[in-house]
Image (cartoon, grey):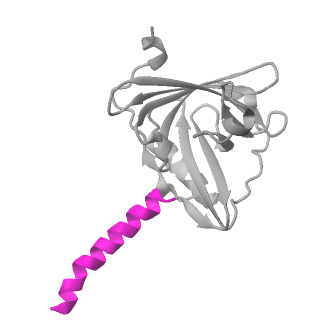
Amino acid sequence: MEGSRLAPSRIYCVLFCTIIKAVISTGLGKCPVYPPLPNFDIQRMIGTWYEVERSFYLVELTASCTELHLTLNERGYFLITINTVNKWTNNPSTTYGIGIPSHNASSIFRYKLNNRVPYVIGRLLPGAGVYNILFTDYDQFAIVWSCTSVSIAHSDHIWVLGRRREIEAPVRAQIYAIMEELRLDPDRLIISKNNNCTNISDNKV
């Protein structure tokens, strides 16, 4: 009888641990070091990308229909426009930022909001930080990763971007295989809300 009483508790524990594994993205030690993507062609990243999947990220808790528009300025910096729709209020939102490559045409770049606050403050705003395009085929998908070291631990986030809002199953399998090679757990990914999305930028007055 006592063993049967413990069974539900064990089930709840397993479910809880599974949820925590998917949501919490921390690990001991400093952030892993991934080198820049070899032969990265920054020009081919230009255009529209859609968020297809991501790991849990509190900043994006209410966001849906996330789309990114990338251009390059004369200095080779990314000019990034991010459009989202609040999934609770259905209100659109747009943020503007700049991505500064760590060196010329690098796949590693520092992102900050494009505003007039001092840099030391801007780099602390939500979403600001160093991002690494771990892999992309430029035409279908890109795997983007960001990590922050805090004392003896680190916290990281993963995004899967696509040229379309949906990625076909064989391509997803390829993405997950690449992530596993990079020792990133695909089970952490959450499918982004892309239902009933329209071109947000076209709907703005």
Query: What residue sits 65% from the left and 54% below the top?
Result: 148
Picture coordinates of residue 65, whole percent (x, y): 43, 30
User: Which segment did they paint magenta?
Assistant: 1-24
Q: Quarter of the image containing the N terminus? A: bottom left
Query: What residue sits 59% from the left and 54% below the top?
Result: 156
Picture coordinates of residue 47, whole percent (x, y): 62, 23
Q: How many marks?
A: 0
Above-or-below relation of 119 to 96: below
Above-or-below relation of 192 to 16: above
Quadrant in the rendering for residue 71: top right
Residue most extreme to the left: 1
Q: Is residue 165 magenta?
A: no
Q: Quarter of the image containing the C terminus? A: top left
In the image, 9 versus 67, the foreground residue is 9
Above-or-below relation of 146 to 122: below
Quick check: can you spot residue 164? Answer: no
Residue most extreme to the right: 104
Picture coordinates of residue 36, whole percent (x, y): 77, 46
Quick check: can you spot residue 75? Answer: yes
Chief SS of the magenta region: helix
Quadrant in the rendering for residue 196: top left
Q: Is residue 8 magenta?
A: yes
Query: What residue sits 76% from the left and 37% below the top?
Result: 40
Query: What residue sits 29% from the left and 72% below the top?
Result: 12
In the image, 143 versus 154, the foreground residue is 154
Q: Is residue 130 left or right of residue 67?
A: right
Picture coordinates of residue 157, whole percent (x, y): 57, 50
